[in-house]
Amino acid sequence: MNQHYNKLDWKNIVRTAISSHWTVKLKADCEEKSTLKLLSKRNLNIGQTHNVWDTISSSVKDVRKAATKVRMLTGTYMLQTLKVKFNQAEIDPTCPICKLEAEDLQHLLTSCLAYRHIRKSHFQQIKEYVVSKIGNSVWTINFNNKMAITELLIDCQAWLKGTFSQMTK
Ligand SMILES: [Zn+2]
């Protein structure tokens, strides 16, 4: 009450307070949703678009790709295991393409034999890039399972400097 803010400062103070209130609420809500387990909550802020949207061009092709990624990120991408949750009796969770495993995100992104060739070329590039930043041994320790790889592909913000397990000497 003793401080006299000008209109602009006051607007900024109010905006910051509102954003931080809803950011806290958003993050708390996200933690409760199992569908959002792959979404990194670290950089989730009200008033800021997610990196998926910030890193694309405005071309139709990029927007379509980003929409698919966002569906994967938010657990709304229609996979057989998700369909089963809604229609238990009639749906088979098995991957309709390779017919070998249940089709979930991990299967689609890391295991499905049908996408092996596409995956090989793209994944190698991603792996080489990450290895160039963190080194081979840190890669081996952190990405020795398919869930960690899935997490890296879906939202790499979960993996920031300082979050990697290091080799104990
Ligand atoms: Zn498959």
Image (spheres, rainbow, N blue to C red):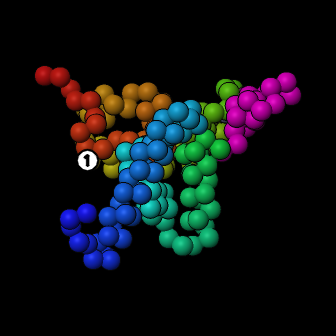
Check disc 1 and give the amino acid type.
Answer: Lys
The residue that appears at 50% across and 40% down in the rendered structure is: 30
Foreground of the two, 59 or 2 = 2
Which quadrant would residue 11 be assigned to in this image? bottom left
Q: Position of residue 49 (x, y in %)?
A: 46, 61
User: Seen in the image, is 133 located left or right of residue 43?
Assistant: left
**Dot 1 lies on which element?**
helix
Name the side, left or right, on which 137 lies relative to 39. left
What secondary structure is the stretch in magenta mostly built from? loop
Q: In the image, is the residue at mark 1 within 8 Å of ligand 1 by its beta carbon?
A: no
Residue 41 drawn above or below residue 165: below
Camera sees residue 44: no
| Ligand 1 located in image quadrant | top right
Q: Nearer the viewer, residue 94 or 56?
A: 56
Vertical order, 142 against 160 (above or below): above
Q: Residue at image x 32%, y 76%?
A: 8
Question: How many numbered discs sit on the rendered protein?
Answer: 1
Residue at the spot of label 1:
133
Q: What is the span of residues highlighted in magenta in the rendered image?
A: 77-97
Q: Quadrant of the C terminus?
A: top left
Q: Outermost residue, front direction?
A: 2
Residue 139 at x, y percent in the picture: 31, 35
Report the residue at 23% width, 72% height from top.
Answer: 4
Is 135 magenta? The answer is no
Q: Quadrant of the N terminus?
A: bottom left
130 vs 35: above or below: below
Q: Is residue 62 visible?
A: yes
